[in-house]
Image (cartoon, rainbow, N blue to C red):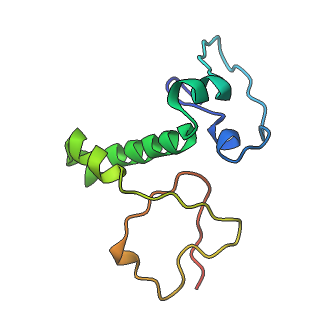
Amino acid sequence: MKKGDNFGLSSIISNSDRTSTVNAKTKCTCFSISVDTLTLIIGENFIEILLMNFVKMGFHKSKIFQSFNTSLIDKTISNFSLKKFEKNEIVFPIDYETSKNVTVIIEGDLVEVK
């Protein structure tokens, strides 16, 4: 991890304990904020807001979406829906028309099964 990276969100999203230990590789300074404080400042739906910001970051990394202006990105993101899947759960069945959706992976990995 390097300057600007973040960690800890996975355990917040899944409401689980941390899955790894993080050690300082060099002298560093980190900012952190508690879930209680996030809830107090942002509200009970802070996890959804954080996830939508990850979608926004994904848009900015996309060659296609990075040309959108900020208000258009905000308008688009507000229409995304959040759906969680368990390990091995089918996300898109073989006959699903994926060409009618844009999907951003927030957490985890998907694998294509033929």
Q: Position of residue 75 (x, y in %)?
A: 27, 49
Quadrant where the N terminus is found in the figure:
top right
Query: As displayed, is residue 36 above or below residue 103?
Result: above
Report the residue at 58% width, 37% height from top.
44
Quadrant where the C terminus is found in the figure:
bottom right
Q: Quadrant of residue 22?
A: top right
Q: Is residue 102 left or right of residue 28?
A: left
Q: Position of residue 87 (x, y in %)?
A: 71, 66
| Whether residue 63 is visible | no
Query: As displayed, is residue 13 above or below residue 43?
Result: below
Q: Please name whichever residue, 15 or 103, is drawn nearer the observer in this view of the structure.
A: 15
Q: Position of residue 79 (x, y in %)?
A: 36, 56
Query: As displayed, is residue 64 above or below residue 44?
Result: below
Q: Position of residue 59 (x, y in %)?
A: 34, 48
Report the residue at 53% width, 77% height from top.
92
Q: Quadrant of residue 52?
A: top left
